[in-house]
Image (tube, rainbow, N blue to C red):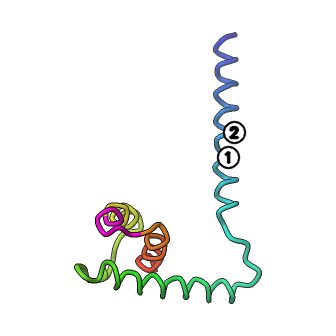
Amino acid sequence: MIKKVACSVFTLLLLAGATIVLEAQNSARPAHKDSHTSQQANDAERTQGEQRFQQNCGRCHQAPQTLSSRVAPTVLMHMRIRATLTAEDQRLILKFMNQ
């Protein structure tokens, strides 16, 4: 009886956690009215990211030709501290590096 209750509680917690994660992902996605407009916004952010890369990172580093999308956020997190990048700088530079 206790095992059944524990199993049920565990299942409910898993479902609740999955629901929370999905809701967070959906709320993080911007609502796009038009794919053309969203593409222009992405291009503008990449351009800003490239500019910020040149201003902050380009003093010491060349823009990497390839950088894994799994590795790039970690590298930027460490460099954010060393180069005193803002969160916005980090976001835009990551967008540029993951193009």
Outermost left residue: 60
Q: Nearer the viewer, residue 59 or 65?
A: 59
Name the residue at 66% across, 83% down.
38
What type of secondary structure mainly makes up the magenta span?
helix
Q: Is residue 78 depicted above or below 7 in this figure?
A: below
Is 64 displayed left or right of 70 in the figure? left
Number of the label disc, if any, that sits on residue 20: 1
Q: Amino acid at mark 1?
A: Ile
Residue 12, position as x, y percentages in the image: 70, 32
Q: Which residues are magenta?
A: 79-85
Helix, strand or loop at disc 1? helix
Q: Position of residue 70 (x, y in %)?
A: 40, 63
Residue at 65% over, 63% down: 28
**Percent position of residue 69, x then y:** 41, 68
Residue 76, numbered circle: none
Front residue of 78 and 25: 78
**Residue type marked 2:** Ala
Residue 31, image x, y percentages: 73, 72
Residue at the spot 70% in from the left edge and 24% down from the top edge: 8
64 versus 40 height, above or below: above
User: Can you say whether 85 is above or below 78 in the image?
Assistant: below
Seen at 48% across and 76% down, the residue is 92
Q: Are marks 2 and 1 in contact (CB under 8 Å)?
A: yes
Q: Residues within 10 Å of mark 2 (few under 14, many from 20)?
A: few
Q: Residue beneath label 2, please?
A: 16
Q: Residues within 10 Å of mark 1 (few under 14, many from 20)?
A: few
In depth, the one of 13 and 91 nearer the eye is 91
Question: In the rendered image, which quarter is residue 61 located in?
Answer: bottom left
